Image (cartoon, grey):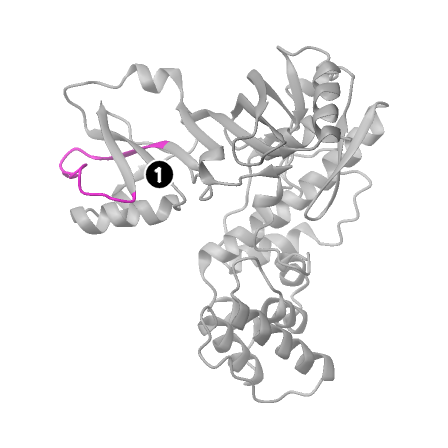
Amino acid sequence: MILKKQAIDFIVTENLTQKYMSLISKTKGSYKIFLLDKIELDTIYCLRQISKENDIPLDKINFCGLKDRHAKTFQYITIPSMYKIDVKRYKLFNIKHIGYTEEKLRLGLNKSNSFEITVRKLTDIEESDLNRNIKHIPSPRNIYIPNYFDDQRFSNTGLKKELHFDYIFRWDLNGFVRFHLTNIINKDEKELRQKKRELEEIFESKKSKFFSYENVKGSLNLQKIYDFYNRKKDFFFILKTINNEDIDMWYSAFLSFYFNFALANYIEKNYSKIKISDYYLGNLNYVYNDKIRKQDIDKQIPFITNERFPTDFYDGIDFPYSRNNIKSILKKLRIKENLSLRNIFIRVENFEYTIEKDDMYDGYNKVIFKFNLPSGSYATNFVKYLFLK
């Protein structure tokens, strides 16, 4: 099967809370609200274009969250009413003025997302697995699945499938530099991949020597780190040369990995009917043909570094880091502790599907799924569940 053959095969529509939508006015308000319609573009790229072309400070454009680049997405943005936007000037994306509101958008106002996902080139076995799995869902109107983070969360993990913050929390400068400079990630182009392989050989030889990326695209900061490392700069100095967005993303990936690991362990201990799927960093357990326990439906747990909400959820998980040490390092790097809670199971709403002939692959069928998920949950995780073997 093929998921995301083209961006239009993955459509995401943001749903704001009912309360927020009810307060939108057609005539006046402190903020203007727009619907941003994009395809194959980052949310931040679009906002920067709007900011630049309308002379609006970027921090004055508010939104609920990032949307997938490799998709067709619809999401809302707000700007103070004093600014004007020319909604007709953009060629790569569209914006439509919806109305006015007294409250700017922020995280938490996105209640859910609606998905329309096309999976192509189904084999007979995959179609059989899909039909069997849907038949075994205990209640199609009340589908609950584990709230795993899926592969997109770990896009910068790279081919080595390790986590940056394992090195950072150990304060392991040598290990971090070698991993970061030689780890090949999806967006690396051919020349940069080759340079990383050459540098891996240098580290393997344990002989420090001059190395140049020769201005290969995407290597500027990597060269700076390598040069500082050989000049005996300390770990904190080197970390401060890295983009804050990257460090935040690494921290999120670290927390997400341990959440997934603990949730898979929790399901194995508490449910007898299980099927297994894999993801980028290991295996995931799914409850199969069995109802979710009542006490688990609304159960929320903190992330593993959070000491303020004691929990037995992580019992049995090998976690070698002192929480006091973690707190100290996060403070040093000016990273906010993640004190949020996450549901361990989520409800899939308004699920429907159709199987029809694939218009791109002769002799194959495609399936079109439509459903809603709570904000922050991964649609591809539900697709994995539907195709469990």
Q: Image check: 161 left or right of 152? A: right
> The C terminus is located in which quarter?
top right
**Residue 65 position within the rendered picture, expressed as x and y whole percent measured from the top left:** 42, 37
**Residue 262 position within the rendered picture, expressed as x and y whole percent measured from the top left:** 74, 38
Q: Which residues are magenta?
A: 75-92
Outermost residue to the right = 272
* Tag 1 residue: 38
Position of residue 87 relative to residue 152, above or below, is above
The three-letter code of the residue at mark 1 reads Lys
> The N terminus is located in which quarter?
top right
Secondary structure state at the residue bearing disc 1: strand
- Give the overall secondary structure of the magenta segment: loop
**Residue 325 position within the rendered picture, expressed as x and y whole percent measured from the top left:** 65, 56
Q: Residue at x 54, y 68 (%)?
A: 190
Outermost residue to the front = 362
Does the segment drawn in magenta span residue 85?
yes
Q: Nearer the viewer, residue 135 or 360?
A: 360
Q: Residue at x 24, y 30 (%)?
A: 96
Q: Image check: 369 left or right of 128? A: left
Q: Nearer the viewer, residue 284 or 190?
A: 190
The part of the image, by quadrant, that contains residue 97 is: top left
**Residue 88 position within the rendered picture, expressed as x and y whole percent measured from the top left:** 17, 38
**How would you rate the neighbour count of disc 1 (Cα within 10 Å): few for under 14, some for 14-19, many for 20 or more?**
many
Q: Nearer the viewer, residue 40 or 291?
A: 40
Does the segment drawn in magenta span residue 175?
no
Q: Residue at x 70, y 29 (%)?
A: 387
